């Protein structure tokens, strides 16, 4: 064995000195896939490290205690102070900001009232520059207010202008350019506006049942054990109904988003690498083709097959190392470029560095991919006898490697799949991806076999170019299968992405507006209901008005098991994070579709019951008769599930995860939410009439929210398309490699055809027929695969309604055909330019 390896290394080293030109496609395919995976992993890790390193500033303290509706009791504040904790209280709610001058324009804002200790970490940056306390202080009897730049732009405000929040008048002092804890408490439905805690009472916005969140940030003495402090606080106030998180959990939503985005982009990179694997097989085949005489000569001179195989494997290992090294270098550089481009999107500045984990995983993916796809063509060259190698051009040997090679190939493929699943955060999704990729590969191979069979049985055309082009598809050694797979995988990804994007866009821009209300009005007090109804009824163009009681509740236990100990499906985990909407009703709300159990009688006054979201119940693994314990205003209430409802969230109607029976909840302080349908012309007068008469009531304009979602989806769609283009680029490289693999054969055929009297135009037409048929076939199969993939994602992952978009698929097939013909024409240009005499002399 040592002699075999020594001889193999000597042969490999001498051949590598001649350059790696024949393996450029292998290097490019591996480099592209490895670079994508390494870049995504490095950027994801850099963002996570940035979040961890800056966690105290992001959270606003060492710990945060968050609670809805009611402030923290004084005894809890005293308990924290006794242990050296410094406290900062922040109150968050939504309100309408009204300009006092001119047309009294208004907009919904996310209001944040801060005390004098804010911020405990970091600093707020204002324009013009000034301390935050000075900007929010009372001057000339009027408190100050700062707002994000978009507020000034949309309402045409300048520092010094007077604005109204609820019943309170404020002076705009400047622009809030940087909010240190923005990631931990993002503004969702409107831009941020900040005032002092002392001036909040004057607004009259905080009333019983109002949608208010109190956040208390705690800064501990240097060297304190944050985990021990948290445990002690939870033990001292078990009935607080609080949500407590430490600086290490400053932005769990952002981390989840980063992880999910990284998973998707990694799978895109893996798809590119999988397509690149086909390119590796093509490149190794082309390389073996170029070394045909060398291998034959070595075997004729007595070189053992093991030596030939080992020499080839060592050369391939060196080539793969070059491709992986280039990919890793690009993977280190690309995140810096991406960070510059996404500076306004990333939640925190990434902490760049050389992270061995993501780079090692990317390198291992590249190595396993190269080994998996190169083993078969290498083993084939080893198995073919020397005589067959000499006549392989005209009579290709169809020998198959032995069972040992088949088993080794299967083992490498299993290791590659295992690595994909092992490194993924959502392993079921990753496993489904691997299964889908394998099924797609099989489908394209079957498609290639069917195409070759049809081409062989097609009626003999009277047009020479058509006859020759179809013959090229089924001739011995034709790369039809490799080219079809390489093209199809990339196009399947693009088709799926385009269909998913189109379906989401269609639901937002077409389906929703037909039934969506014009406004959601929130924080309507019980004593304001009649006045609100009268105002809405008095406005011309106002249609249906629906009102329901509104409370917020946090699910703290299921069947007595605490929420933090529950094992729920990933798609249902969101319901255990934060508060959920809760209402009560004697009769089923309009449009209710009960799928299990039954509604309670209208006069029911027994044990508290609840109608629960059927999709969440499946994720929780519960059903009718089970119990949910929810915390409402600091009190735990156990509700027994009486029915399950199928909820259509897309309708934007009055949908609640939890609808309880009347009785107990009626006595709790709460407000009401109303939806109002109105014509576009009636929207502005209605908004002005309601918010002028009821300053504490806030309005969410649904049309603006839908437009914002539509803009976001267009941006996401562009990002998805660009990532899908990576796969398509891999497919183009592989197609070029497949053409390069058969370059010598095509040159030989072109020379023979020219010698027999064929013109360049006839040869070119034959090639265009061949590649045109390949492109149409690959596009058709990709359309089927992309359609199935998009249906599965939209239906089962996004829980939406899927629609067939024929225009998208037609564009996919057309683009595939044009691209294939273009690349095929460019790749066969060498064969068309070949002069017969030199080649015939060498033969």
Image (tube, rainbow, N blue to C red):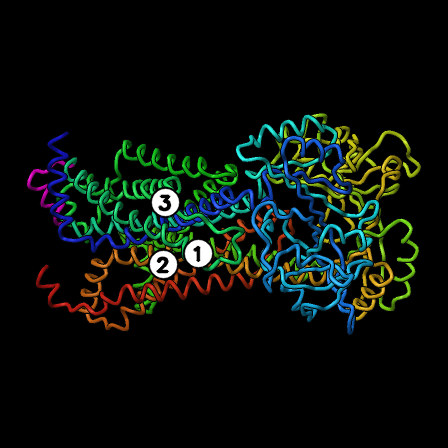
Quarter that holds the N terminus? top left
Q: Earlier in the sequence, mark 3 or mark 1?
A: 1
Q: Is residue 562 visible?
A: yes
Q: Are marks 2 and 3 in contact (CB under 8 Å)?
A: no
Judging by the rendered image, the residue that carries numbered circle 3 is 354
Q: Using the image, determine if residue 34 lies above or below residue 677.
A: above
The picture quadrant where one finds residue 543 is bottom right
| Residue located 34% across and 36% down the image | 412
Q: Earlier in the sequence, mark 2 or mark 3?
A: 3
Judging by the rendered image, the residue that carries numbered circle 2 is 732
Judging by the rendered image, the residue that carries numbered circle 1 is 338
Does 303 appear in magenta?
yes
SS state under label 1: helix
SS state under label 3: loop
Query: Residue pushed farthest left?
Result: 301
Cα gap from disc 1 to disc 2, whole angstroms? 24 Å
Please state if 393 lies on the left or on the right of 607 as rendered: left
Cα gap from disc 3 to disc 1, whole angstroms? 16 Å
| Residue located 62% across and 53% down the image | 802
Q: Residues within 10 Å of mark 3 (few under 14, many from 20)?
A: few
Please state if 282 lies on the left or on the right of 791 as rendered: left
Image coordinates for residue 794, horizontal then vertical, percent: 60, 50
Cα gap from disc 2 to disc 3, whole angstroms? 31 Å
Mark 1 or 2, closer to the camera: 1
Please state if 434 lies on the left or on the right of 178 as rendered: left
Image coordinates for residue 314, horizontal then vertical, percent: 20, 41
Q: Nearer the viewer, residue 507 or 114?
A: 114
SS state under label 2: helix
Q: Which region shows up in magenta?
A: 293-305
Does 828 appear in magenta?
no
Mark 2 or 3, closer to the camera: 3
């Amino acid at each position: 064995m040592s002699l075999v390896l020594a001889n193999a290394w000597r042969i490999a080293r001498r051949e590598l000195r001649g350059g790696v030109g024949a393996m450029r496609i292998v290097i490019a395919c591996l480099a592209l896939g490895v670079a994508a995976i390494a870049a995504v992993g490095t950027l994801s890790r850099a963002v996570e490290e940035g979040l961890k390193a800056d966690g105290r500033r992001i959270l606003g303290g060492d710990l945060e205690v968050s609670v809805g509706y009611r402030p923290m009791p004084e005894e809890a504040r005293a308990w924290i102070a006794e242990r050296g904790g410094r406290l900062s209280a922040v109150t968050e709610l939504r309100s309408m900001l009204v300009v006092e001058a001119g047309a009294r324009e208004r907009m919904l804002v996310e209001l944040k009232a801060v005390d004098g200790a804010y911020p405990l970490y970091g600093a707020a940056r204002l324009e013009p520059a000034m301390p935050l306390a000075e900007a929010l202080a009372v001057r000339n009897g009027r408190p100050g207010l700062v707002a994000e730049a978009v507020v000034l732009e949309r309402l045409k405000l300048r520092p010094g202008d007077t604005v109204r929040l609820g019943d309170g008048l404020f002076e705009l002092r400047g622009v809030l350019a940087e909010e240190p804890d923005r990631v931990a408490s993002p503004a969702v439905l409107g831009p941020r506006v900040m005032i002092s805690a002392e001036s909040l009472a004057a607004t009259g916005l905080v009333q019983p049942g109002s949608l208010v969140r109190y956040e208390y940030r705690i800064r501990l003495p240097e060297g304190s054990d944050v985990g021990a402090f948290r445990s002690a606080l939870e033990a001292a106030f078990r009935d607080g109904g609080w949500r407590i998180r430490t600086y290490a959990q400053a932005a769990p939503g952002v981390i989840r988003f980063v992880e999910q985005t990284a998973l998707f982009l990694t799978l895109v990179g893996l798809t590119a690498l999988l397509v690149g694997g086909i390119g590796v097989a093509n490149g190794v085949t082309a390389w073996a083709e170029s070394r045909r005489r060398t291998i034959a000569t070595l075997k004729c001179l007595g070189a053992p097959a093991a030596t030939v195989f080992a020499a080839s494997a060592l050369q391939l290992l060196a080539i793969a190392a070059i491709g992986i090294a280039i990919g890793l270098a690009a993977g280190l550089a690309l995140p810096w470029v991406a960070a510059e481009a996404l500076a306004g999107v990333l939640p925190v500045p990434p902490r760049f560095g050389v992270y061995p984990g993501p780079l090692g995983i990317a390198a291992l993916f590249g190595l396993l991919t190269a080994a998996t796809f190169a083993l078969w063509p290498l083993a084939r060259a080893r198995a073919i006898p020397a005589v067959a190698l000499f006549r392989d051009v005209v009579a290709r040997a169809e020998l198959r490697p032995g069972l040992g090679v088949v088993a080794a190939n299967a083992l490498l493929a299993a290791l590659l799949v295992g690595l994909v699943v092992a490194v993924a955060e959502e392993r079921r999704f990753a496993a489904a991806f691997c299964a889908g990729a394998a099924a797609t590969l099989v489908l394209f191979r079957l498609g290639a076999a069917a195409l070759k069979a049809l081409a062989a049985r097609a009626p003999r055309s009277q047009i020479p170019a058509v006859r020759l082009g179809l013959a090229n598809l089924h001739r011995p050694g034709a790369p039809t299968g490799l080219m079809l797979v390489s093209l199809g995988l990339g196009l399947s990804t693009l088709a799926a992405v385009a269909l998913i994007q189109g379906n989401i866009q269609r639901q937002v821009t077409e389906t929703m507006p037909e039934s969506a209300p014009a406004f959601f009005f929130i924080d309507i007090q019980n004593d304001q209901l009649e006045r609100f109804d009268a105002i809405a009824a008095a406005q011309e163009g106002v249609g249906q008005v629906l009102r329901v009681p509104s409370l917020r509740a946090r699910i703290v236990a299921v069947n007595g098991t605490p929420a933090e100990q529950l094992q729920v499906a990933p798609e249902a985990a969101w319901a255990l994070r934060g508060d959920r909407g809760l209402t009560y009703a004697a009769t089923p709300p309009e449009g209710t579709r009960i799928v299990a159990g039954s509604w309670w009688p209208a006069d029911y006054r027994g044990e508290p019951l609840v109608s629960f979201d059927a999709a969440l119940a499946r994720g929780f693994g519960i059903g009718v008769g089970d119990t949910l314990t929810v915390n409402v205003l600091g009190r735990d209430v156990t509700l027994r599930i009486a029915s399950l409802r199928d909820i259509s969230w897309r309708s934007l109607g009055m949908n609640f995860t939890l609808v309880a029976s009347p009785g107990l909840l009626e006595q709790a302080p709460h407000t009401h939410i109303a939806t109002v349908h109105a014509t576009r012309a009636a929207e502005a007068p209605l908004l002005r009439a309601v918010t002028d008469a009821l300053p504490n009531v806030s309005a969410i304009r649904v049309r603006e929210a839908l437009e914002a979602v539509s803009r976001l989806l267009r941006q996401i769609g562009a990002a998805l398309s660009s990532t899908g283009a990576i796969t398509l680029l891999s497919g183009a490289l592989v197609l070029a490699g497949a053409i390069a693999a058969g370059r010598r054969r095509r040159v030989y055929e072109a020379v023979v055809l020219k010698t027999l009297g064929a013109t360049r135009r006839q040869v070119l037409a034959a090639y265009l027929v061949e590649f045109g048929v390949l492109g149409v076939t690959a596009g058709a199969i990709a359309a089927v695969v992309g359609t199935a993939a998009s249906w599965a994602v939209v239906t089962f992952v996004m829980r939406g309604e899927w629609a067939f978009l024929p225009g998208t698929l037609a564009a996919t097939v057309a683009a595939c055909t044009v691209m294939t013909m273009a690349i095929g024409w460019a790749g066969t240009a060498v064969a068309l330019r070949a002069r017969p005499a030199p080649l015939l002399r060498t033969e």
